[in-house]
Image (spheres, helix red, strand yellow):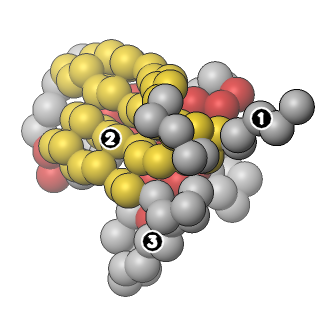
Amino acid sequence: MNEEKWMLNRAGIINFWYYDVAYFDFADGKLLLRGANGSGKSVTMSSLITVLLDGRKTPDRLDPFGSSARKMEDYLLGEEDVSHRSERTGYLFLEYKRQGLDQYVTTGMGMQARRRQ
């Protein structure tokens, strides 16, 4: 039986971190992110891959360096002095495409955070 493989095709972030809306297109299941230090490459990948594939939002899973300093609320609301947000709903998604066919599957998650007063 010759089954075609599913490959990552596209990812998206809506109202998350410092993004309003961002889409990332994969080429043959691969994605290259480049940017200056602190531009959000690690946050983007650890959020998309870790959170969407295993569903765990604990601080130790969000930080690529293993610290527990950041929480999901931080990724949704941003720094209070910078974003001035008190509430936000954000979304993450991964889209898969079956190789050689026009078949797609999308997995995603919506999250809401409120800043404690």
SS at badge 1 = loop
Which is more foreground, mark 3 or mark 1?
A: 1
Amino acid at circle 1: Glu
Instruction: Tell which circle, 2 or 3, labels the residue nearer the N-terminal end.
Output: 2
x, y percentage for residue 43? 48, 54
Quarter holding the N terminus is top right
Question: In the image as oriented, which residue stretches furthest toward the bottom?
Answer: 36
What residue appears at the point 29 percent right and 49 percent down from the top-left corner?
23
SS at badge 2 = strand
Q: Which residue is mark 1?
A: 3
Q: Which residue is mark 2?
A: 13
Q: Is residue 4 above or below residue 64?
A: above
Whether the residues at callouts 2 and 1 have beta carbons within 8 Å, the answer is no
Instruction: Tell which circle, 3 or 1, labels the residue nearer the N-terminal end.
Output: 1
x, y percentage for residue 73? 40, 30
What residue appears at the point 77 percent right and 35 percent down from the top-left corner?
3
Number of numbered discs overlaid on the protein picture: 3
Which is more foreground, mark 2 or mark 1?
A: 1
SS at badge 3 = loop
What residue appears at the point 57 percent right and 30 percent down from the top-left corner?
52
What residue appears at the point 16 percent right and 43 percent down from the top-left corner?
20
Question: In the image as oriented, which residue stretches furthest toward the right?
Answer: 1
Instruction: Tell which circle, 2 or 1, labels the residue nearer the N-terminal end.
Output: 1
Amino acid at circle 3: Leu
Question: In the image as oriented, which residue stretches furthest toward the left?
Answer: 84
**3D distance between C-alphas at marks 2 and 1:** 30 Å
Q: Which residue is mark 3?
A: 33
**3D distance between C-alphas at marks 3 and 1:** 30 Å
Residue 5 as seen in the image, left or right of residue 79: right
